[in-house]
Image: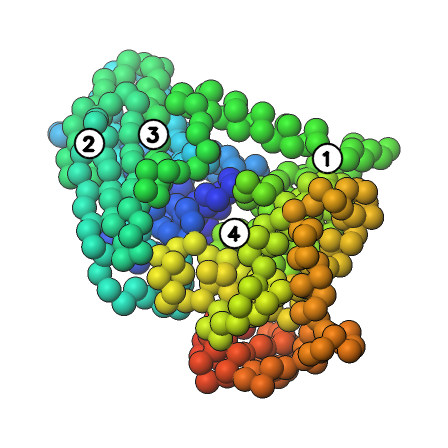
Amino acid sequence: MTVSLKEDALVLVTDDDGGLPLGATSPLGLYYHDTQYLSGYALRVNGATPVLLSANHEQDYVATFQLMQAEGATLGSARHAADILSIRRTRFLADGLRERVGVLNAAAHPVIVAVELEFEAAFRDMFAVRAYRELSQEPLMSERGPREGGLVFERLGRDGVRRTTEITMRPAPDVIEGNRFKVTRTLGPQEFFQLELAVIPKEDGAGAAASPDRFDDAIDALNARYRRFLRTCTRYSTSSETLDEGLITRSALDLRALLEFHPSGPYPTAGIPWYAVPFGRDGLIAGYQTLGWNPDIARGTLRLLAGYQGQKVDDFTEEEPGKIFHELRRGELARLGEVPHRPYYGSVDATPLFALVFAETVKWTRAGTRCAARGGRIRRSRCRTRTAGGRSCRPPWSRCRATSTRRRRASPTSTRWTETASARTGFAARHASYASASSATSG
């Protein structure tokens, strides 16, 4: 089992005990903009990995793990019973991964506690993690080392972007050895010790939205953002408290977790963890279905999609004038153009959905002139759904350029419309496994 957390553009996927395998090409990790900024993370207490007792990740951005010392853990010549140390890990996502590790001595005598944290950062692209495409060249630079009382992993990609993972701990580690933090304390009976960890991903020195330095202040700020979001939503109430809290409020919080926040407004991503990026169809349908609940979602979706509306003919990305994208990725492979998702426009329904959702948003909000999708974008999307010359308004799949082929294909798991511009060179034609997986999973 895995545990997934998400906040804005950050996604964390771990084992059920909160750890990440070391020295393995695991898909687990901390992701930011389709890049694996933390690929390994191990906690050891007195030389052994603690044993999981329970985990709580009811909220989509906070998780708590209750552990105990592994049977037979040793420190020097001393041997400690498994039930002497109670260990709790509490974590959330804000500007990065924030975690608090607490250790309680439940014994009636003093105990020496040695905590060791080990990290790895592979900076793998999401397409490489999922075995669709590897980088064809080595990075320009890759290094790690201690810096300012912490640890920094750094990689200069072929796309010219310097990606860093900055890891700090409070209180500072007693020792930084390679990619490990080490802390040793002597705890009296019922004495408690805790440390706070921050893992911050950055691109060219810029990362996610700033957050307070202290753990408690940061989680309070995050909870406040969720409360503010709920206050902006339409309130529904019934005679059943279970229905109100268990379904309506829970659904609202789940949708809030899916949102990414752009200058254009909120955008509902397609799914946690692997599809937590903007998809055209998914965002439009979610925005349409939530117009009566929070129209800001539809507005933000329309604005972002309008900003990427097709301007030219590109057989690789399947872009055409007026077309709305299918999927937007921001990793190194997309930036280099080794995959077409910069964005990828191979969608048959995103463009007419864009026009439909715009019309419905105007109807619901009476604010069409303030929508960033104005200024000819709707006219271009409507032209995209017509045949050449605008003599009819047939569905877009009935219109084919001379260099394109469109066909309907049945697969074992789904039936979808496959669009290829120059079928011999189009991405969907050459990577059918990705196309079918994307459509089946992203909705």
Report which residue position mark 1 lands on: 233
What is the distance, in whole Å, between disc 1 and disc 3 at their CAs?
34 Å
Nearer the viewer's eye, disc 2 or disc 3?
2
Other residues around mark 3 within 10 Å, as few (<14) / some (14–19) / many (≥20): many
Task: Give SS at disc 2.
Answer: strand
Disc 2 residue type (three-letter):
Arg
Secondary structure at badge 3 equals strand
Q: Amino acid at mark 4?
A: Ala
Residue occupying image coordinates x 13% and y 30% = 76
Q: Secondary structure at mark 1?
A: loop
Residue 271 seen in the current view: no
| Spot occupied by residue 2 in the image (x, y as percentages of width and height) | 46, 50
Percent across and percent down for residue 391 are 77, 78
Q: Residues within 10 Å of mark 4 (few under 14, many from 20)?
A: many
Residues 347 and 247: in front is 347
According to the image, label 4 marks what residue?
Answer: 276
- In the image, taking residue 91 as reference, residue 271 lies left or right, namely right
Identify residue for label 3: 197
Q: Is residue 95 left or right of residue 437?
A: left
- Report the Cα–Cα distance between label 4 and label 2: 32 Å
The residue shown at (64%, 71%) is: 348
Tell me residue 139's x, y (percent): 23, 56
Question: Which callout, 2 or 3, points at the residue further toward the start of the chain?
Answer: 2
- Give the distance between the C-alpha atoms of the residues marked 4 and 1, in whole angstroms: 22 Å
Look at label 3 and name its amino acid: Leu
Q: Residues within 10 Å of mark 1 (few under 14, many from 20)?
A: some
Note whether 253 is above or below 110 in the view shown: below
Q: Give the CA distance from mark 2 to mark 3.
A: 15 Å
Q: Earlier in the sequence, mark 2 or mark 1?
A: 2
